[in-house]
Amino acid sequence: MVRFRRFAEGLEWIGLIGLMLMLLFTLVDVIGSTVFNKPLRGSIEWVGFIQIIAIGGVVAIDLYEDRHIAIEFLTMNLSGLPLKIILKFVSIVGVVFFAALCWQSITYGLSLQQSGEVSSTAHLPLYPFAYFLALIAVSAVLYYVAELLPARHIQSKERSTEYESG
């Protein structure tokens, strides 16, 4: 569990670097276009692709830190077995969804790599972004698998009772 969390924290740092790169590209583009009348070529594409890194990098750590969107009004009055069943069901759905996302991202990345697809202005290869999305999905699958394990479930139950009392 600790290794999975460290992996998620590493991805969070990659996401933060992506956020800073978005800021840098935007800054260089604005200064270049207003001061030197020469905008940064492909900056909109760069920022768009770096958004995948910035947003995707925080998905797993958001799961570990409970910063994701949760529909608590359905479970706030539950405890015991009904709550356990719902938490297990959500974890199973999460594993299935993110495993499918990983599989499809890898398939899409392979097709992009084989075709040599690049972006139109900056001529960036597109396949690394699909592979990064697959990596993000793997981190989410690891989280949900850990949620399904008995030791992690005890922590989830304690956390859910904290929400009920707090």
Image (cartoon, rainbow, N blue to C red):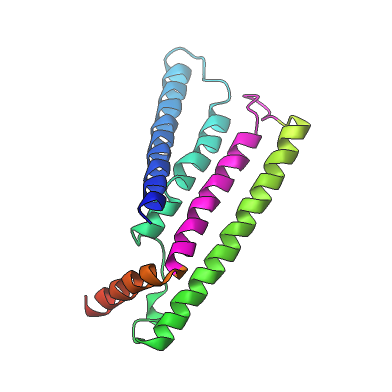
Q: Residue at x 41, y 48 (%)?
A: 8
* Residue 143, percent from left and from top: 45, 59
Residue 155 image offset from top left, x and y in percent: 32, 70
Q: Quadrant of the C terminus?
A: bottom left
Q: Position of residue 110 (x, y in %)?
A: 71, 39
Residue ID at (49%, 46%): 56
Say which residue appears at 43% left-offset and 30% top-offset.
21
Q: Is the magenta region chiefly helix, strand or loop?
A: helix
- Is residue 128 placed above or below 145 in the rendered structure? above
| Side (left or right) of 80 relative to 52 | left
In x, y percent, where is residue 42?
Answer: 58, 25
In the picture, the quarter occupied by the N terminus is bottom left
Answer whether residue 124 is magenta in the image: yes
> Residue at position x 39%, y 41% from top?
10
Find the residue positioned furthest to the top.
36
**In which quadrant of the rendered view does residue 156 lie?**
bottom left
Per the rendered image, the range of residues in magenta is 118-147
**Left or right: residue 161 compared with residue 113:** left
Relative vertical location of residue 95 with respect to residue 45 in this rendering, above or below: below
Query: Residue at the left extreme?
Result: 166
